[in-house]
Image (cartoon, helix red, strand yellow):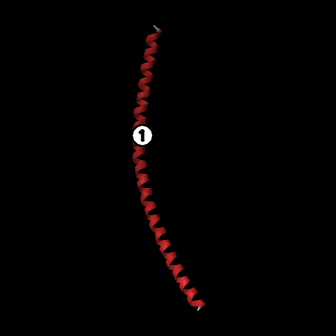
Amino acid sequence: MPWAEVAQYGVGFFAVAGLIFVVARYFDGRRNDELAEVIQNNTKALEQVTAVVQAIQISLTRQEAKIDELLERARR
């Protein structure tokens, strides 16, 4: 009976596909944990970069004010 063999191949195919699906889900879950850690680390790094940029902006503003003050004194 060829239909019995086709059925066996079908069951085998679905068994292998199910196994591949379970293994893929396992590795995907591990990858998501690693991805969450990377995102968290990148967020911390971006917060630190933002703080440095703000400090630089404040420093530049102070320097501009000092330069304007010196130019005003030089013009008098």
Give coordinates of residue 66: x percent, y percent.
Answer: 52, 83
Name the side, left or right, on which 70 lies relative to 46: right
Give coordinates of residue 65: x percent, y percent.
Answer: 52, 81
- Which residue in the protein does label 1 denote? 27
Q: Residue furthest top?
A: 1
Quarter of the picture containing the N terminus is: top left
Q: How many tags in the picture?
A: 1
The answer to whether residue 12 is above or below residue 73 is above
Name the side, left or right, on which 65 lies relative to 25: right
Quarter of the picture containing the C terminus is: bottom right
Give coordinates of residue 36: x percent, y percent.
Answer: 40, 50
Give coordinates of residue 56: x percent, y percent.
Answer: 49, 72
- Check disc 1: other Cα within 10 Å, few if <14, some if 14-19, many if 20+: few
Name the side, left or right, on which 72 lies relative to 30: right
Q: Residue furthest front?
A: 76
Q: 28 or 46: which is nearer to us?
A: 46
The answer to whether residue 61 is above or below residue 42 is below
Q: Secondary structure at mark 1?
A: helix
Q: As shown in the figure, which amino acid type bears the numbered disc 1?
A: Phe
Q: Residue at x 39, y 33 (%)?
A: 22
Q: Quadrant of residue 16?
A: top left
Q: Residue furthest right?
A: 75
Q: Residue at x 43, y 16 (%)?
A: 8
Q: 14 or 76: which is nearer to us?
A: 76
Q: Residue at x 50, y 72 (%)?
A: 57
Q: Quadrant of residue 68?
A: bottom right
The answer to whether residue 22 is above or below residue 76 is above
